[in-house]
């Protein structure tokens, strides 16, 4: 499903948090959002899964305006894994994963046979079958994160929204989750802080800073030393991954003798 964001703006307490963000994500595309803390990434996502209402601009699913859909209808198209995602009650893992079917049920309707199969398949994909009867509140952070991803997959979304989905995950599960993204939904929008993971997982990357979309492009186009220095204030080297060809960002820890300031001259030369 085509996702179109046009001139999105969000104002909170008189302060503009997001301004003029325009972005499209096509069917089968994985779009990453990167940027410093407080740059507006999560705010954009919150507008997509309707936890926040935009102050301006339009979001469209296909040809339909998102704000005109009922909450149930938008939930049938969009699944979200948020940073605040969790559980207040100690449901079992199987029960939490099954909640992904809630937008398609009325009252206490039981799961159909095919929906039960979806739940089992998602738990198998996320390596949590052995946790099926455990209470979610007793799980580790990484285990709980995989349960919530499974719940999103059971929703069978046409658009999957993920805010820092690799938080708490060990290296193996990070890699497996990112490899799964392309199969999870026709359209994926994901916020990632790890630039190397973004380079490996995303077809295109949007860079936000101070609430504005600075640029959008392929990982090769976006992840340059100049842009990273400008946006993050960090000097890096970028090399080609020997197996995939994707850009890899290399950096050294500062020795404490100098602050890592943006490099405007490097950026200017690179963009000319």
Image: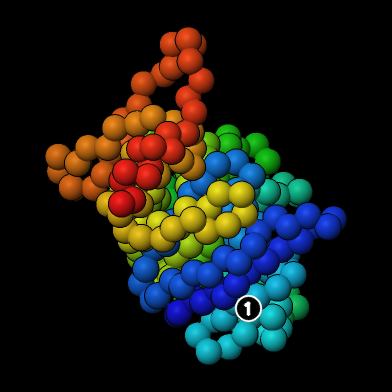
Circle 1: element type = strand
Q: Position of residue 234 (x, y in %)?
A: 44, 31
User: Taking 128 as reference, is 236 left or right?
Assistant: left
Which residue is located at x 40 percent, y 57 percent?
205
Q: For this rendering, which residue is in front, 167 or 68?
A: 68
Q: Quadrant of the N terminus?
A: bottom left
Count of numbered tags = 1
Q: Quadrant of residue 68?
A: bottom right
Q: Could one spot residue 33 in this view of the protein?
A: no
Q: Which residue is mark 1?
A: 58
Q: Position of residue 4 (x, y in %)?
A: 51, 77
Which residue is located at x 42 percent, y 34 percent?
263
Q: Could one spot residue 252 in this view of the protein?
A: yes
- Residue furthest left as drawn: 242
Q: Quadrant of residue 241?
A: top left
Q: For this rendering, which residue is in front, 226 or 85?
A: 226
Which residue is located at x 83 percent, y 57 percent?
14
Which residue is located at x 36 percent, y 60 percent?
217
Q: For this rendering, which residue is in front, 84 or 256?
A: 256
Up/down of 91 relative to 54, above or below: above
Up/down of 263 relative to 85, above or below: above
Q: Position of residue 232 (x, y in %)?
A: 49, 37
Q: Position of residue 132 (x, y in %)?
A: 54, 50
Q: Mark 1 packing: few (<14 Cα in 10 Å), some, or many (20+)? A: some
User: Taking 229 as reference, is 18 left or right?
Assistant: right
- Residue furthest right as drawn: 13
Up/down of 175 relative to 46, above or below: above
């Amino acid at each position: 499903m085509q996702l179109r964001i046009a001139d999105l703006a969000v104002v909170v307490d008189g302060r503009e948090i997001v301004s003029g963000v325009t972005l499209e994500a096509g069917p089968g595309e994985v779009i990453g959002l990167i940027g410093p803390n407080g740059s507006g990434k999560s705010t954009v996502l919150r507008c997509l899964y309707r936890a926040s209402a935009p102050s301006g601009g339009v979001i469209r699913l296909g040809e339909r305006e998102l704000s005109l859909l009922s909450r149930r209808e938008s939930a049938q198209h969009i699944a979200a894994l948020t940073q605040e995602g969790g559980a207040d009650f100690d449901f079992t893992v199987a029960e939490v994963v099954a909640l992904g079917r809630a937008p398609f049920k009325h009252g206490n309707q039981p799961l159909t046979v095919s929906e039960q199969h979806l739940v089992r398949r998602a738990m198998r994909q996320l390596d949590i079958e052995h946790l099926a009867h455990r209470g979610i509140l007793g799980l580790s952070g990484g285990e709980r994160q995989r349960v919530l991803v499974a719940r999103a997959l059971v929703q069978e979304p046409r658009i999957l929204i993920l805010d820092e989905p690799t938080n708490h995950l060990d290296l193996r599960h990070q890699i497996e989750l990112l490899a799964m993204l392309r199969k999870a939904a026709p359209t994926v929008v994901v916020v990632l802080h790890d630039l190397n993971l973004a380079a490996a997982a995303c077809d295109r990357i949007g860079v936000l800073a101070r609430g504005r979309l600075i640029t959008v492009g392929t990982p090769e186009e976006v992840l340059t030393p100049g842009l990273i220095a400008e946006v993050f204030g960090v000097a890096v080297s970028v090399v080609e991954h020997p197996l995939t060809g994707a850009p890899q960002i290399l950096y050294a820890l500062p020795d404490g003798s100098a602050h890592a300031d943006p490099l405007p001259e490097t950026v200017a030369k690179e963009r000319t």
